[in-house]
Amino acid sequence: MQQIRTAVSMFHFLLTRFAAQFSVMIKIIKFKYWASVPIFLATILYVYALLPTDIGVMYDDNGSASYSINKSYFFYAYFALFILTNGLIRAYQHMILPKSEISMESYDQLSKEQKIYHWWTGLSLVFNVIYIFSSFYIGLYNSRDVNPDHYVALVYLCPIILIGWVFYFFYLKFISK
């Protein structure tokens, strides 16, 4: 238990030590969020062109597709998922804290609610990165020309990013001041 407290206090020390740079980080996260939208669109369009007409969804023991869907259904469902998650996060973000109360002066001067408000922008970015990586991997997996085994790190990277961001939320909610 003492080791956990030590690790948490060291993490808190590092965050507060670099707090002056976090106001710049908030701007960078917002920029990356808005940049991730056209990157997602470009990726999903590229994957759409790369995919065969039918995409294998479930596979049997032999490795052949036992259930497949049309690539148009995949494209529109994936695009709808992107719009839905980003729209819900942005709507919730504006419900919890109106934009007029957000200050960008210094991270130290932000309240806990304002820090959590900015966390939601980062969550949208995390989901967008996950969508980009997963759509790219799905395109590679269903491609006949590329071996997807070389890109399996994309599958493991997505949950790691999401879990790290969720832990940061718990840090903001319960430990930070």
Image (cartoon, rainbow, N blue to C red):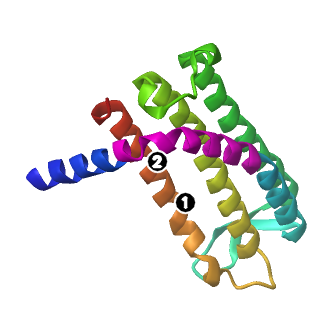
Answer whether labels 2 and 1 touch (C-beta < 8 Å). Answer: no
Count neighbours of disc 2 (C-alpha within 10 A) and say few if under 14, some if 14 to 19, many if 20 or more: some
Q: Which residue is located at x 58 percent, y 28 percent?
A: 104
Amino acid identity at mark 1: Cys
Quarter placement of the C terminus: top left
Q: Nearer the viewer, residue 84 or 61?
A: 84
Q: Nearer the viewer, residue 125 or 61?
A: 125
Check disc 2 and report its element: helix, strand or loop. Answer: helix
Overall secondary structure of the magenta stretch?
Answer: helix
Q: Is residue 13 left or right of residue 161?
A: left
Mark nearest the camera among 2 and 1 is 2
Q: Is residue 115 above or below residue 71?
A: above
The image quarter containing residue 71 is bottom right
Residue to which mark 1 is pinned: 158
Residue at the left extreme? Answer: 2
Q: Which residue is located at x 66 percent, y 61 percent?
A: 134
Please state the extent of the stretch shown in magenta in the rendering.
15-36
Question: Can residue 1 be seen in the rendering of this structure?
Answer: no
Amino acid identity at mark 2: Trp
Residue to which mark 2 is pinned: 165
Count neighbours of disc 1 (C-alpha within 10 A) and say few if under 14, some if 14 to 19, many if 20 or more: some
